[in-house]
Image (spheres, helix red, strand yellow):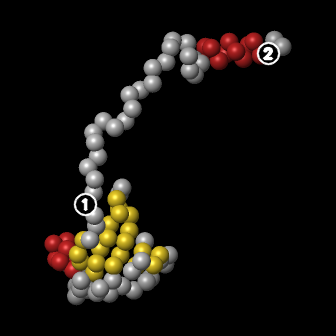
Amino acid sequence: MRLNDETISKAHVLVGPGDVLTFAKAEQVKIVKILDMGKRRGPASEAQTLYEDLSPTPLKRAKNLSAPPAVREPGQGRPTKAERRALDRLKETD
């Protein structure tokens, strides 16, 4: 988290009107400028009037970006339980 471009490591730092907070939220970076301090704890709609969101617009992610599953030839890859036991038996005879 950053307060006015300075990294903060303690949660007890006081903030006030005019301060800019930069923090990570989900997979994006949020930049928020505090406009006013609330007098009481209230609903979210009231809280949204106390800050200005300066975050850049998030880029839309293309759907299906994941690669298709790898194709393996039969008999390749991780051995089955029966094949592992057979390998263990071969190793024991040495």
Residue at left 51%, top 12%? 74
**Side (left or right) of 78 relative to 10:** right
**What amino acid does circle 2 point to?**
Glu
The residue indicated by pointer 2 is 92
**What amino acid does circle 1 point to?**
Thr
Residue at left 62%, top 14%? 83
The answer to which image quadrant residue 76 occupies is top right
Secondary structure beneath label 1: loop
The answer to which image quadrant residue 29 occupies is bottom left
**Side (left or right) of 66 relative to 58:** right
Residue at left 26%, top 49%? 60
Contact between labelled residues 1 and 2, with CB atoms less than 8 Å apart: no
Q: Residues within 10 Å of mark 1 (few under 14, many from 20)?
A: few
Q: Nearer the viewer, mark 2 or mark 1?
A: 1
Residue 11 seen in the figure? no
Q: Quadrant of the C terminus?
A: top right
> Residue 67 location, x and y as percent?
39, 32
Q: Which circle marks residue 57 in the picture? A: 1
> Residue 11 location, x and y as percent?
45, 78
Q: Nearer the viewer, residue 72 or 5?
A: 5
Q: Nearer the viewer, residue 92 or 60?
A: 60
